[in-house]
Amino acid sequence: MKIAILPGDGIGPEIVAEAVRVLGALDLKFETETALVGGAAYDAHGHPLPEATLALARQADAVLFGAVGDWKYDRLERPLRPEQAILGLRKHLGLFANLRPALCYDALVQASSLKPELVAGLDILIIRELTGDIYFGQPRGRRTAVDGHFPGAEEAFDTMRYSRPEIERIAHVAFQAASKRASASGRPGARGKVTSVDKANVLETFQFWKDVVSAVHAQYPDVELEHMYVDNAAMQLVRAPRKFDVVVTGNLFGDILSDEAAMLTGSIGMLPSASLDANGKGLYEPSHGSAPDIAGKGVANPLATILSVAMMLRYSLQQPQAAERIESAVQAVLAAGLRTPDLWSEGTSKVGTREMGEAVVAALAGAAGDALRSGRTMTRIKS
Ligand code: NAD
């Protein structure tokens, strides 16, 4: 198994170093190769996604990505900006399914913007279609209106569209994920549930979406399917988020709902993500950006990237037990009271990026509490 490591810019190299440390602590053999991406690649090679980086990502079984971007590149023409590297990787690798778990750890219940009783035990998976919808539909542009309320006025327009195969493949991803989650829960007779989010009452594209998702559902009798309008879904996510299991939706609605769901869990520094192709190959990255404001200070939270490694083991490398070990280790360090500054509150121990990575490695060996108590492996940050 070969993993391409693309640390990127800002805090990217710091958090990826900790994720690689955790990967190395598993008793598994992987080949890894590192390459530049984003602003770092632009500085060295004049392009945010050099040919060599793309070739490495193509050959690899999975890609571990940090983050890209910095304000100093804002004046570059759009195709040379660091963020274009992500769009290029998605396009060239055919990554059409974005998976974002929103999981509220017991130890972080207080960090959520919702009341603890609403989010305790929250575990939902948002699946967003990544390559279609109004973001990519043609035609789009500006023109002079020939009809509508103001004929002759300047107007802008985009095209919302989805083809049957595009909807079918993302629906399969959702039903399979729900089925896997139900069997992994260990609850006898547990049944997965998919909530398909649409706007079928107004949009032709999403009436079609609903019809196609229903047709695919016939192949998954073990999974329950419900349809929900996007306005209601936005409301239910803050009213009763635990009613959801797997949520599947299009690119535009998914963009918004996945950020809303993310906030239920407390910190952006905790959220992993996966973008998968049709064969299970994926790009794994934290949901946050390169955080230039804290880069180089050793205070970034590496847990989203470490949890992205767990997703990589589960979805691309077929190592679900190793994935669970990492997730349990993260839970253990949080339960032991360790927090990077983004999560710190009175009564918990403030640690830096490296110490957090080391604590997860110690917890993999069953020693998170020991490490905290002895203080031997921790250089605490004075709060
Ligand atoms: P950001 O996610 O980088 O930062 C937002 C805030 O969250 C900042 O205050 C930051 O310090 C904090 N933060 C983010 N990750 C953190 C972590 N792991 N630990 C602790 N705190 C963390 O978003 P932004 O500031 O809007 O964007 C900064 C740069 O990142 C921009 O150039 C943007 O284009 C880029 N960006 C890249 C990606 C990506 O690489 N996938 C995604 C979003 C933004």
Image (tube, helix red, strand yellow):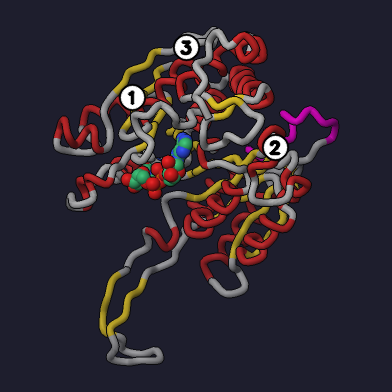
Instruction: Name the element at disc 1.
Output: helix
The numbered mark at residue 24 is 3
Q: Is mark 1 within 8 Å of ligand 1?
A: no
Q: Are marks 2 and 1 in contact (CB under 8 Å)?
A: no
Q: Is residue 346 left or right of residue 77?
A: right
Q: Nearer the viewer, mark 3 or mark 2?
A: 3
Decide: is 239 above or below 154: above
Q: Which amino acid type is marked by label 3?
A: Gly
Quadrant in the picture for residue 152? bottom left
Residue at image point 78% right, 47% down: 117
Q: Which amino acid type is marked by label 1?
A: Gln
Quadrant in the picture for residue 156? bottom left
* Distance Cα–Cα, label 3 vs label 2: 30 Å
The numbered mark at residue 225 is none
Image quarter for ligand 1: top left
Label 1: which residue?
A: 59
Instruction: Name the element at disc 2.
Output: helix
Residue at image point 74% right, 54% down: 240
Q: Nearer the viewer, mark 3 or mark 1?
A: 3
* Distance Cα–Cα, label 3 vs label 1: 21 Å
Asked if residue 186 is among those painted magenta in the image, a careful observer would answer yes
Residue at image point 35% right, 33% down: 295
* Residue 311 can be seen, yes or no: no
Q: Which amino acid type is marked by label 2?
A: Ser
**Label 3 crowding class (10 Å Cα cut-off): few <14, some 14-19, many 20+?**
few
Label 2: which residue?
A: 179
**Label 2 crowding class (10 Å Cα cut-off): few <14, some 14-19, many 20+?**
many
Which segment is the magenta one?
A: 176-189
